[in-house]
Image (cartoon, coloured by chain):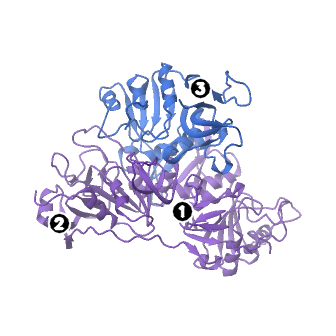
Chain colours: A purple, B blue
């Protein structure tokens, strides 16, 4: 052996250099579990497929488990999620970095998770497959050689692969290798190892980076970006013309981001495509009020080009909504989607489900132009996942990391909409410090929230 | 919803023993079992299941690994000869092996390995009335073998069909007598999704309180999904 193989702490420190402030980082079993203990608390979201958001490193006294079943502490502002929510976070484009420990990685980025030479028929995909296919960057953190001293970096995997062409960078006990389109490139070597030493023990062709250097083990300073914005205008100033915007709320005025809505109105941005349960009926429904703020303020300001909604019309024909009037004048387009289908399309968009078969609306005009399919004797129609550029939602309380709790039925579309937009802005009655919300009560984890605005105490929901 | 022969009164979902709460599980049943590395696993119900002598079960779960001495887990169901097949993302801990690995290698136990996110999404679909979902996970690998593949947004996706089971066995921290559940920490794991995906759902809990005894904002699994409750031993 030319040099000393790196220990797990050094490997964890090097892996930490792949992270950035505010990143959502999924950690698989094994070596990735060492990373949280090496990184200052609170700068990134470490998530475990056990259902833990905010892994803060080993803690034998904790009831919370990491991916390997080891007890770990939870950082202030951490929360718990079910396996199904974790699946959505991994697959839905919310995970920036996944760190996994494969047993083999091939020249093209294929990997094998836990199958080994000693147990060739044994395999265990766990969540590694979900992590690899869902994360923007996939880091393989692994011993360079296996226990019989054969290279874990190979031309082609010798076992069935758990992920095809998914690995982006390999950090081993002897160096760092990038997976490029044309193969593997050695970019760093461990202290005491020469380029030739690493090439020698690697059973795959390696090109050598012209900038190849010795590995360093400093841990970057990671500080969570500030999400609290001073007012509605500053939080929405980059909403572009023609943007698709999720607008929360059910029917009445509750659970609606009135303050953010006025910000959007004051900005005057046009051509908006709203996705919302209604297109603004709070003003004209029995439980509303003629001067309550709803979508109508955007419609009347000629900012709305289209609504995708389940309940776009007024319940009273004699009191048409602003959207109905605009639609009848040809100013807006409309796509009507049943409420459950609307929520499911949003949930799919947020959870990385491209499309799904639902029985709702089969045999009606809602199925027109859509693929139908018989599954177990029942007719289903294919509906597509839906995403938005921006999302404005209303919470009751948030901490500064963006964890949100709601109140009563004002929860409605908020949690699902928060998962589907590129930029999600929440309006809340109160902002607290991380750790001040009970982790069990957090409904929307902060990793879905980009911006937080306090609804001013003197703000009125009435015009 | 099944009726409770022990108690036809208002709290009819509460059963006195694990065995009675498991009435109706027959040989060959499919059973969802919650838990992740022992956390949130219904240990009393698993003991009860073993004592019913039922066999040929298809068990759908995270896996049977890291069992602590003195506890009763899915591995014990397997060693007791109750299980024909296990569907799981990680059927046993790859390094420690154990009875599941032995039975599988000797051909006595069938294993189907499904990545965690695919398995839970199939259950969610089953519970939410979705027939099937197109997922990107596992495209180009053995996990996509024999399945319809289709390109969405320029990316290969695989059609995964809904999954439902005969029974679901859950573990929660607290229930009210109606069956509303709260969990604790990472014990939540598979529980809320499995609760939706079975014909009969049985939850083992530390405590049963009266309706109203749980803050409505904290309820994770709504009572409509729960058929039977039993206190943990």
Circle 1 sits on which residue? A446
Q: Quadrant of residue A348?
A: bottom right
Dot 3 falls on which chain?
B
Whether residue A218 sits left or right of residue A296 in the image: it is left
A426 or A300: nearer the viewer: A426
Disc 2 sits on a residue from what chain? A
Residue located at (44% from left, 43% from top): B147
Count of all numbered marks drawn on residues in the image = 3
Q: CA distance from mark 3 to mark 2?
A: 61 Å
The answer to whether the residue labelled 1 contacts the one labelled 2, judged by CB atoms less than 8 Å apart, is no
Q: Which residue is labeled 2 in the image?
A: A191
| Image quadrant occupied by the N terminus of chain A | bottom left
Residue for badge 3: B21
Percent x, y of residue A221: 38, 71
**Structural crowding at the residue carrying mark 1, measured as other residues with C-alpha within 10 Å and reported as few (<14), some (14–19) or many (≥20):** many
Coordinates of residue A55 in the picture (x, y in percent): 43, 56
Looking at the rendered structure, whether the residues under marks 1 and 2 are on a common chain is answered as yes
Please, what secondary structure does the residue beneath circle 2 have? loop
């Amino acid at each position: 052996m030319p040099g000393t193989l790196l220990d797990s702490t050094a490997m964890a420190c090097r892996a930490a250099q792949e992270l950035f402030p505010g990143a959502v980082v999924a950690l698989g079993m094994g070596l990735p579990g060492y990373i949280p203990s090496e990184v200052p608390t609170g700068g990134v979201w470490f998530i475990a497929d056990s259902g833990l958001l905010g892994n803060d490193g080993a803690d034998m006294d904790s009831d919370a488990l990491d991916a390997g079943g080891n007890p770990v502490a939870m950082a202030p502002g951490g929360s718990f999620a079910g396996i199904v929510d974790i699946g959505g976070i991994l697959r839905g484009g919310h995970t920036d970095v996944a760190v996994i420990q494969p047993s083999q990685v091939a020249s093209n980025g294929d990997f094998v998770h836990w199958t080994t030479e000693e147990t060739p028929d044994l395999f265990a995909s766990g969540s590694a497959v979900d992590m690899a296919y869902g994360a923007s960057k996939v880091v393989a953190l692994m011993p360079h050689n296996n226990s019989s001293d054969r290279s874990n970096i190979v031309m082609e995997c010798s076992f069935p692969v758990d992920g095809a062409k998914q690995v982006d960078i390999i950090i081993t006990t002897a160096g760092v290798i990038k997976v490029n389109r044309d193969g593997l490139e050695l970019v760093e070597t461990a202290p005491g190892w020469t380029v030739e030493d690493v090439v020698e023990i690697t059973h795959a062709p390696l090109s050598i980076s012209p900038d190849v250097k010795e590995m360093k083990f400093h841990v970057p300073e990671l500080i969570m970006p500030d999400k609290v914005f001073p007012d509605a205008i500053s939080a929405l100033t980059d909403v572009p013309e023609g943007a698709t915007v999720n607008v929360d709320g059910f029917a009445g005025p509750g659970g609606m981001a009135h303050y953010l809505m006025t910000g959007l109105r004051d900005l005057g941005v046009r051509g908006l495509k709203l996705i919302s349960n209604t297109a603004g009926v709070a003003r004209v429904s029995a439980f509303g009020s003629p001067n309550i703020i709803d979508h109508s303020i955007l419609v009347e300001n000629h900012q709305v080009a289209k609504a995708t909604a389940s309940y776009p019309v007024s319940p009273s024909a004699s009191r048409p909504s602003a959207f109905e009037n605009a639609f009848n004048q040809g100013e807006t387009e409309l796509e009507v989607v049943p409420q459950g289908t609307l929520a499911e399309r949003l949930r799919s968009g947020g959870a990385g489900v491209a499309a799904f078969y639902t029985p709702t609306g089969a045999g009606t005009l809602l199925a027109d132009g859509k693929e139908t399919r018989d599954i177990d004797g029942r007719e289903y129609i294919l509906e597509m996942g839906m995403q938005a550029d921006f999302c404005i939602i209303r919470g009751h309380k948030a901490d500064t990391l963006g964890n949100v709790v709601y109140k009563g039925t004002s929860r409605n579309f908020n949690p699902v909409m928060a998962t589907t937009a590129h930029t999600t802005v929440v309006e809340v009655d109160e902002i607290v410090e991380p750790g001040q919300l009970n982790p069990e009560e957090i409904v929307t984890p902060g990793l879905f929230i980009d911006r937080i605005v306090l609804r001013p105490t003197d703000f009125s929901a009435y015009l | 919803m099944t009726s409770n022969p022990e108690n036809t009164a208002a709290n009819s979902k509460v059963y006195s023993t694990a065995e009675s709460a498991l009435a109706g599980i027959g040989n060959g049943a499919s059973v969802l079992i919650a838990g992740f590395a022992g956390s949130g696993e219904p240990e009393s119900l698993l003991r009860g299941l073993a004592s019913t002598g039922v066999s040929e079960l298809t068990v759908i779960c995270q896996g049977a690994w890291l069992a602590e001495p003195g506890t009763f887990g899915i591995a014990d169901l397997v060693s007791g000869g109750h299980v024909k097949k296990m569907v799981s993302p990680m059927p046993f801990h790859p390094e420690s092996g154990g009875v599941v690995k032995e039975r599988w290698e000797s051909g006595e136990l069938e294993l189907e390995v499904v990545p965690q996110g695919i398995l839970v999404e199939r259950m969610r679909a089953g519970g939410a009335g979705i027939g099937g979902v197109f997922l990107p996970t596992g495209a180009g690998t053995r996990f996509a073998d024999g399945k319809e593949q289709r390109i969405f947004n320029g990316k290969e996706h695989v059609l995964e069909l809904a999954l439902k089971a005969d029974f679901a066995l859950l573990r929660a921290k607290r229930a009210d007598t109606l069956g509303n559940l709260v969990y604790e920490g990472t014990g939540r794991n598979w529980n809320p999704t499995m609760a939706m995906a079975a014909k009969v759902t049985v939850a083992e809990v530390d405590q049963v309180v009266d309706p109203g005894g749980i803050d409505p904002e904290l309820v994770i699994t709504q009572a409509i999904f729960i058929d039977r409750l039993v206190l943990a031993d």
